[in-house]
Amino acid sequence: MGKFKPSDYSIENAIKEAARYQGGIYAGDNYVMKDHGDYIEVHVDADNAKGHISLDIYYDEEGRITKIIPHK
C-alpha cells in the first residue's frame, strides 16, 4: 500500500469506504475520522513514511474517551 495523506482524501474515497463503517466518515483539511460504532479511527497528516499517524479512540455512552490505541 502506498503513502496515505489524509489531506488528499476525497469524496470518492469516502463513497468507496462508506459501506464498511457503521457510522460516518468525516474529512477535514488534514485529517480523516471513521466512525466504527464503538470507536473512532483517526488519521492525521504527518511527515513520516506512512504520510500520517493513526489511532483508535474508544469512548463511553456519555462521550468520554476511555482508551486511545495508536496504530503501528
Image (cartoon, rainbow, N blue to C red):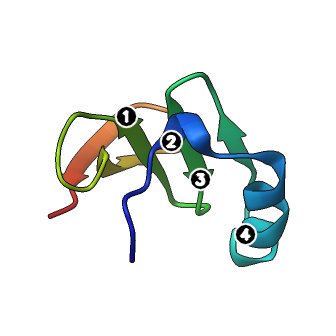
Q: Of the numbered discs in the image, which one, if any, rests on residue 34?
A: 3
In what element is the residue under mark 3? strand
Q: Kindly report the distance in space between the C-alpha atoms of the residues bearing marks 3 and 2.
A: 12 Å
In the displayed structure, 1 sits above or below 71; it is below
Residue 48 as seen in the image, left or right of residue 24? left
**In this figure, which residue is indicated by the disc labeled 1?**
45
**In this figure, which residue is indicated by the disc labeled 4?**
17
Q: Are marks 4 and 3 in contact (CB under 8 Å)?
A: yes
**In this figure, which residue is indicated by the disc labeled 2?**
6
In primary-sequence order, the first of circles 3 and 2 is 2
Amino acid at dot 1: Asp
* Residue at 59%, 22% in the rendered image: 29
Q: Kindly report the distance in space between the C-alpha atoms of the residues bearing marks 2 and 4.
A: 14 Å
In front: label 4 or label 3: 4
Return the residue nearer the eye: 37 or 10.
Answer: 10
Give the x, y percent position of residue 19: 81, 75
Give the x, y percent position of residue 48: 17, 44
Q: Kindly report the distance in space between the C-alpha atoms of the residues bearing marks 1 and 2.
A: 6 Å
Q: Kindly report the distance in space between the C-alpha atoms of the residues bearing marks 1 and 3.
A: 15 Å
Residue 6 as seen in the image, left or right of residue 44? right
Question: How many numbered dots are placed on residues in this image?
Answer: 4
> Alpha-carbon neighbours of circle 4 within 10 Å: few (<14), some, or many (≥20)?
few
